[in-house]
Image (cartoon, grey):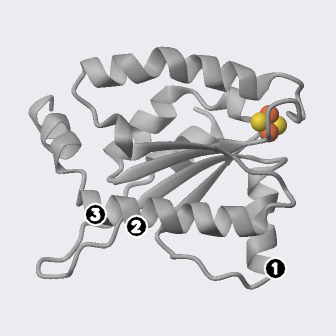
Amino acid sequence: MSAESEAAEVPFEPEPAGVPFEPRVVALVCNWCTYLGADLAGTNRLEYPANVRIVRAPCTGRIDFQLVVKAFEGGADAVIVSGCHPGDCHYTSGNYHARRRWGVFRPLMDLLGLDVDRVHFAWISAAEGRKWAEFVTEVVERTRAQGPNTAFRAMAEESR
Ligand code: FES
């Protein structure tokens, strides 16, 4: 099992009863662009919601969509996949592979009854700390409006 697979699988703590819903977001990001963009946001002290758990992968081409499913299994309400801009991948074409893979995975996810609107893609470079902060804020607010990912949890519970 890869390190990123293990990290995506770490379950969130269950929400205590009576506590208002706070979206739980897993961000699967590439090491060379988005991770550094997120780091830059921190260095520049840009504020964004603390609801995101970052899982670093070498490249978006390495992000198998089983990782997305594992993140949901761990209790995520939304998943972000983000890496280098097209043409800027450190490994030349990993992000193109990721984009093509999503083209296949999306209808499959839809067919299985999973909510595709809870998976968010972005290209965020190492210089785009502000874009990272704004994107995370937008995803968290959208997820807050969607509510907890109860449909996936119910489905996962049924299949046990
Ligand atoms: S190294 Fe960033 S997407 Fe490939």
Check disc 3 and report its element: helix, strand or loop: helix
Report how far apart the C-alphas of labels 3 and 1 lie in the structure.
29 Å
Q: Quadrant of residue 116?
A: top left
Task: Say which mark, if any, is on residue 145.
Answer: 3
* Residue nearest the observer in this picture, 87 or 30: 87
Q: Which residue is mark 1?
A: 43
C-beta proximity under 8 Å, tags 3 and 2: yes
Residue at the image position 15 percent from the left and 35 percent from the top: 155
Q: Quadrant of the N terminus?
A: top right
Q: Which three-letter amino acid code belongs to the residue tagged 3?
A: Ala
Q: Does 121 sit left or right of 23 as displayed?
A: right
Quick one: label 3, few (<14), some, or many (20+) residues within 10 Å?
few
Q: Which three-letter amino acid code belongs to the residue tagged 2?
A: Glu
* Residue nearest the observer in this picture, 38 or 58: 38
Check disc 2 and report its element: helix, strand or loop: helix
Q: Which residue is mark 2?
A: 141
Q: Quadrant of the C terminus?
A: top left
Residue at the image position 33 percent from the left and 43 percent from the top: 73
Quick one: label 1, few (<14), some, or many (20+) residues within 10 Å?
few
